[in-house]
Image (cartoon, helix red, strand yellow):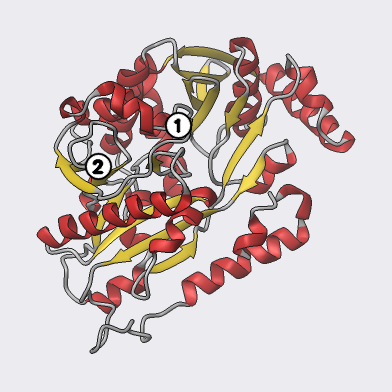
């Protein structure tokens, strides 16, 4: 049955998911996406990390939700700099002038790479565009109320970017992210079936990496809740090494939200011990038929390294997923080529800045201010173009539309 196409779309600001009918939310949220679920969002609310408001799009007088947009504050003081929009749009910050280092609110998600839109997928394209335009206008009003000129989407997946294209205007800015999402589809029924899909040379390397790991390293899978204080500093150390300044408190809050939302059975840590000492750890979160590898941490650079990273971030999660009967491992962003060589698909991500009318990037007459530096966008596109040219088989065809 074809759904009725909405006419007028209204948007309501809602402070908590407790004020939204659970069935109506579940009807519009992607059931495959942990970060759209009521379970996750309510856990964030309990932790104090939840959205400042939810925008709920409906037809007047109807309970059916057509689309929704969580809006988050994103402050440097959170220590969660990867989800600090100004980090990815420094050129806009320079052009905006003094705004206390803040440019706008963060839309969609503050966790997980690959932000998917919360919008009724049964709507025809024209109706979906109407809903997204209404959400855009409402998000701009919320940002303006806070004296902020932008609303940001970070790490949009390609499908969401395509849907948002019709509502992107001249004053907006978008660019490829400097990391890509990676996902591994599990074939067959066990680890040997996974190995069989890899090229022969890679298969030999993986067997060697697993063999050296199991010879020198013992693993233990424990409830995440029980391991947070051990692994949070290790995660901070790894991210700092790659230029991402996180606080232990910020990582602890995020891991606690996973544990609270999912429980002990679906949020676990794999601890890798070398001579009895925890040398590395991976965080695994199960949601329906997917296993998300959300974090990796290690103790120090001087510890022996029997391929702890790839075992904790790929091989052990793959084994865990097979044992649980899952179909896919979301291996996350970063180290894309290493993950691609081990079977993951490399999927593009896009950043988007929605500018409010009369925002700081507009010159007289409402036209975009071309003095804003566009080099970061061009540099990233060239980076991915060269990488895909060197390793074409690792890259999903959707890159063709972006490059």
**If the image is split into quadrants, where does the C terminus sit?**
bottom right
Along the line of sight, the residue nearer the viewer: 82 or 9 = 9
Residue 383's spot in the image, x, y percent?
62, 65
Label 1: few (<14), some (14–19) or many (≥20) C-alpha neighbours in 10 Å = some
Question: Can you say whether 365 is above or below 32 in the image?
Answer: below
Along the line of sight, the residue nearer the viewer: 285 or 365 = 365
Horizontally, residue 244 falls left or right of residue 317, namely left
Question: Can you say whether 76 is above or below 221 in the image?
Answer: below
Q: Give the residue at mark 1.
A: 33
Along the line of sight, the residue nearer the viewer: 233 or 250 = 250
Q: Give the residue at mark 2.
A: 59
Q: Quadrant of residue 210?
A: top right
> Residue pushed farthest bottom?
364
Along the line of sight, the residue nearer the viewer: 289 or 343 = 289
Residue 175's spot in the image, x, y percent?
48, 65
Residue 316's spot in the image, x, y percent?
62, 21
Q: Quadrant of residue 201?
A: top right
Which residue is depicted at the point 77% across and 60% down? 390
Q: Is residue 345 visible?
A: yes
Q: Secondary structure at mark 2?
A: loop
Question: Can you say whether 83 is above or below 112 in the image?
Answer: below
Which residue is depicted at the point 78% across and 50% down? 393
Q: Which disc number belongs to residue 48?
A: none
Q: Quadrant of residue 28?
A: top left
């Amino acid at each position: 049955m074809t759904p009725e196409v909405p006419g007028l779309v209204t948007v309501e600001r809602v402070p908590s998911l407790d004020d939204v009918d659970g069935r109506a939310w579940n009807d519009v949220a992607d059931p495959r996406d942990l970060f759209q679920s009521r379970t996750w969002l309510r856990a964030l609310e309990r932790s104090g990390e939840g959205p400042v408001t939810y925008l709920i799009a409906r037809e007047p007088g109807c309970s059916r939700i057509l689309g929704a947009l969580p809006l988050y504050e994103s402050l440097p003081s959170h220590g969660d700099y990867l989800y600090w929009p100004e980090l990815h749009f420094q050129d806009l910050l320079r052009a905006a002038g003094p705004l206390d280092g803040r440019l706008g609110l963060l839309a969609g998600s503050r966790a997980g790479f690959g932000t998917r839109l919360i919008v009724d997928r049964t709507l025809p394209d024209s109706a979906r565009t109407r809903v997204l335009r209404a959400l855009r206008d409402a998000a701009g009003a919320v940002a303006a109320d806070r004296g902020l000129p932008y609303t940001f989407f970070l790490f949009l997946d390609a499908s969401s970017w395509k849907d948002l294209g019709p509502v992107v205007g001249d004053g907006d800015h978008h660019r490829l992210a400097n990391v890509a999402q990676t996902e591994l589809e599990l074939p067959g029924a066990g680890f040997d079936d996974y190995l069989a899909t890899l090229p022969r040379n890679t298969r030999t390397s993986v067997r060697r990496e697993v063999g050296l790991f199991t010879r020198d390293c013992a693993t233990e899978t424990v409830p995440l809740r029980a391991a947070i204080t051990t692994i949070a500093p290790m995660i901070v150390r790894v991210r700092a090494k790659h230029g991402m300044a996180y606080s232990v408190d910020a990582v602890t809050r995020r891991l606690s939200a996973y544990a609270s939302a999912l429980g002990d059975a679906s949020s676990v840590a794999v601890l890798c011990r070398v001579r009895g000492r925890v040398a590395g750890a991976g965080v695994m979160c199960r949601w329906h038929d997917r296993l998300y590898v959300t974090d990796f941490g290690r103790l120090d650079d001087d510890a022996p390294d029997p391929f702890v990273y790839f075992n904790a971030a790929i091989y052990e999660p793959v084994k865990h997923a097979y044992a649980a009967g899952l179909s896919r491992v979301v291996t996350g962003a970063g180290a894309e080529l290493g993950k691609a060589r081990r079977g993951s698909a490399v999927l593009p991500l896009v950043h988007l800045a929605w500018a409010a009318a009369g925002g700081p990037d507009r010159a007289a007459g409402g036209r975009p201010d071309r003095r804003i530096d566009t080099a970061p966008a061009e540099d990233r596109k060239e980076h991915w173009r060269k990488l895909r040219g060197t390793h074409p088989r690792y890259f999903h065809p959707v890159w063709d539309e972006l490059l």
